Amino acid sequence: MLRDDDFFVEKWVAYYGAQLGRENLYVWFDGLDQRVPPCCEGCHTGKIEHLTLPVHQGDKRRIDFLSARARELFERGYEIVIGGDVDEFLVPDPAQGVGLAAFLSRLETGRASVSALGIDVGQDLRTEGTLEKERPMLEQRSFAKLSTRYSKAAALLRPCDWGSGFHRVRGRNFHIVKDLYLFHFGCVDLRRIEERLENAGLRAEGWERHLRKRSGTITLVSHARARDFAKWTAIARRVQNCIRPPYAWNKPAMFELRIVVRIPERFKTIGL
């Protein structure tokens, strides 16, 4: 579900459409005033009434709506339902040589959901300029923070209720799958963040703090030493699969480690 974000929905539809087929994509627009962009042709689209709510209440309303839609898709015969924000992309490691559908279909698990390791892509202000929309993002960005926030319960294998923001599945644990990553691009460009901070509607709903936190990833990747991707993603996966924050037993934790990695060249071939 999205509102006022043609930039990412075009990339979201292009990526998931190639992986899963546009006929299997479901996009809802938050607001009856929203324009469905041409890039959504071939997808299932719908609109709901936009309510001006504080961030927490708005998040809960959205996730309850989307959990209900996921349940309907299971009833219609789908075996796996992926949920995510429009700036998030579920990506199997290209070294595995299979696409997303094949990767998920071959999982042997009795779990209700699976998670991917969170890769929060940032802009290195020392070496990377403003994002060019016409070019793939990963051709222009090379660094990311390993993020518990984006190790989300992205794929449901049976009907469940997501927690706000897809960060967990209510009443169930989570498991991060090897060789599966969730790339988050909300921090990919400082100018884009600044433009959204100027949106009066977002500020009225309390999004300013959230957007300013995103600039923290940019600051981190611009100053921290980048570490080896293979070594530290393996460490992060093991830690996050075992450690939980005291306030949420079904969310991942990582001892507050702030690890920046260099994204391997092979990920630049996926078209994001």
Image (spheres, grey):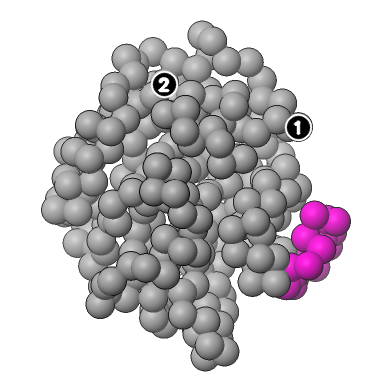
Please identify the quarter of the rendering in which residue 219 is found: top left
| Whether residue 149 is visible | no
Residue 143 at x, y percent in the picture? 44, 25
Residue occupying image coordinates x 48% and y 36%: 267
Q: Earlier in the sequence, mark 2 or mark 1?
A: 1
Residue neighbourhood size for the residue with mark 1, other residues' Cα within 10 Å, grouped as few (<14), some (14–19), many (≥20): few
Residue 134 tag number = 1
Answer above or below: position of 7 versus 260.
below
Q: Which of the pair 85/263 is nearer the observer?
A: 263
Residue occupying image coordinates x 68% and y 46%: 11
Residue occupying image coordinates x 66% and y 25%: 131
Task: Residue type at mark 2: give it.
Answer: Val
78 relative to 116 in the view: left or right: right
Magenta residue check for 62? no
Q: Which residue is mark 2?
A: 221
Q: Which of the pair 141/172 is nearer the observer?
A: 141
> Which quadrant does the N terminus fall into?
bottom right
Answer above or below: position of 32 versus 272.
below
Q: Which residues are magenta?
A: 31-46
